[in-house]
Amino acid sequence: MSDIVEKTLTALPGLFLQNQSVGGPAGVKASFSSRLGGLVRGITALTSKHEEEKLIQQELSSLKATVSAPTTTLKMMKECMVRLIYCEMLGYDASFGYIHAIKLAQQGNLLEKRVGYLAVSLFLHENHELLLLLVNTVVKDLQSTNLVEVCMALTIVSQIFPREMIPAVLPLIEDKLQHSKEIIRRKAVLALYKFYLIAPNQVQHIHIKFRKALCDRDVGVMAASLHIYFRMIKENSSGYKDLTGSFVTILKQVVGGKLPVDFNYHSVPAPWLQIQLLRILGLLGKDDQRTSELMYDVLDESLRRAELNHNVTYAILFECVHTVYSIYPKSELLEKAAKCIGKFVLSPKINLKYLGLKALTYVIQQDPTLALQHQMTIIECLDHPDPIIKRETLELLYRITNAQNVIVIVQKMLEYLHQSKEEYIIVNLVGKIAELAEKYAPDNAWFIQTMNAVFSVGGDVMHPDIPNNFMRLLAEGFDDETEDQQLRLYAVQSYLTLLDVENVFYPQKFLQVMSWVDASLSF
C-alpha cells in the first residue's frame, strides 16, 4: 500500500506543474518536485512512527511559516498546499492551512484555483464553518464563461457544500442542465444528486428536469441521472413506475452494444451502467406483475450475454440474478437464474464463491426447491478453509433443509459445531439444529440423539429457550398418545444410560434436562 501512495504522490508534482506558463524559472519546478518527492521518499524510508511524526512536524512548521509570510506568492502557496495535502493524508493536523486553501481557490489562476479547490474538498467537511467563505467564489465561478472554472465549482458543490447555502447556487446549477457541453450537464446532475442527499425538499420542484437528464443525448449525463433515480425509487417506487419502459429501453441498448465503445470495460458494454439499471428494475418490479412483465425479456437477454469469464461480468450476472428474484416471479427466468449461480459456487475464487452463496439466499427466499440442485456443492463448501464461506454455507443449509435431507444436513452442522470455538457461532448453530430437529425429525431415536448432541456441545451458552422448548415438547407431546409415550420412554432410557457412564462431564443445562426428564417422566 505504501508503494502505491509513494508512486501516486511522486506523480503529483508533474500533475500540478503542467500547464504552467512557458519561461518560468526551472529552478522553481525542480525545487518543488524535489521537496515533495524528498518528503515522500523520506517518509517511506522511516522505520518508526516516532520518526515519521518528527519529520512531519518539522515539515508542518516550515509550511506554516511559509504560508503566513506576506512575501509568499500564489505559485508558492499552491506548492505548499500539495505538501499540506500529503501531511493531512497521513493523519496530521494542518488546520492552519485551511484558510489559505480557500484564499487560493478565490484568488489564483486556473491551476492554482484547481489546487485550492482540491485542498478545500480534502480538508473541510460539509458543516465546517470556513466553508461559508467559499460560497461567493462558487457563485462567481458558476457564472464564469470559462468551462474549467464552471467544472471546478460544480465539482466542489457535488463534494461538500453547506446545506443552508443551497438556495444561493441552485438556480445557477439548474441552468447548467441546459448547457451545450456534456461535462457541464453531467456535473450539474451530480451536484443536484448531492443536494437531494442532504436536502431533498429543496430539489423537489425540479424532478421534471431529472427526467430530461434521463433522456439526454449524451450517455454520461443519462448515467449520472441514474444515481438520483435509484435513490428516489428506493424511497418511493410507486411514483416512478411510468419510467420502467425507459429504463428497460436503456438497458436493451446497453446490453446490445449500442453505446460508444468508450463505455466498454474489457469488452463488456458499460458494466456499471448495467448494474445500476438492474438495481432500479429490481425495485420497480417488486410485487408488481404488470411492471415485471415489461422487463422479463431484457433480463433474459442479460443472463444470456453475461458469459465472459471476467470479474465485471460476474458482477453483472450477480445483480441480474438478484433482480430476477426481486421482481414478480416468472418460472422460466427463475430456473435460468438458478443455473447461472453454479458459475459462482463452483469457482475456486473465494469472492465469487461467496457471491454464489449469497445469490442462493435470494433463490431460497423465492423458491427453496430451485436451490436443491446445488445442495451437494453447498455441503462441500463447509470444508472450505475460509470462515466466512462456512458461515454463509451454514445459513444456506439451514434454509434448504427439508424432511428428505435433514439427516445429512444436521450431521454436517454437528460436525462443524464440534470444530467451532467461537461462542457466537455455537449459540447460533445449536439454535438452528434444535429447530430443524424438532421440525423434520424422521423418528424419535434420531430426535433425542440429535438434541443430546446439541445439549452436550451447546452447553451453558445456548439460549434457555432450547432446553425449555424441549422439555415442554416432552411434557405436552403431540396428537398421537402412543407416539408421545414412545418418545418419552426413549428419552428416559437415553438419559439413564448417559448418567451411568463414568468420568464424563455434562454441561449444567444438560444435567438439568436429564434430571427433569428422569424425575418427571419415569413411570
Image (cartoon, helix red, strand yellow):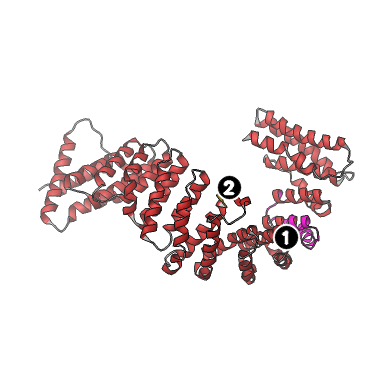
Of 522 and 493, the residue lying toward us: 493
Marks 2 and 1, how far apart in space?
Answer: 24 Å
Q: Report if residue 5 is visible in the image.
A: yes
**Residue under pointer 2:** 265
**Residue 512 rendering spot, x and y as whole percentages:** 24, 44
Q: Height in image: 349 above or below 178?
A: above
State the quadrant of the N terminus. Answer: top right
Residue type of the residue flagged with mark 1? Lys
**Residue under pointer 1:** 181
Q: Does the magenta stretch include residue 506?
A: no
**Predominant SS along the magenta part:** helix
160 sits left or right of 110 in the view: left
**Residue 87 rendering spot, x and y as whole percentages:** 72, 40
- Determine crowd level at label 2: few under 14, some 14-19, many 20+ residues with C-alpha closer than 10 A: few
471 sits left or right of 221 in the view: left
- Determine crowd level at label 1: few under 14, some 14-19, many 20+ residues with C-alpha closer than 10 A: few
**Residue 10 rendering spot, x and y as whole percentages:** 72, 36
Q: Residue 285 carries which label?
A: none
Q: Is mark 2 on a helix, strand or loop?
A: strand
Of 237 and 311, the residue lying toward us: 311
**Residue 282 rendering spot, x and y as whole percentages:** 47, 60
23 sits left or right of 78 in the view: right
Magenta residues span 123-151
Q: Height in image: 233 above or below 425?
A: below
Q: How many labels does the image show?
A: 2
Residue type of the residue flagged with mark 2? Tyr
Write down the quadrant of residue 222 in the picture: bottom right
Q: Please tell me which of labels 2 and 1 falls first in the chain.
A: 1
| Residue at image point 27% right, 49% down | 436
Q: What element carries label 1?
A: loop
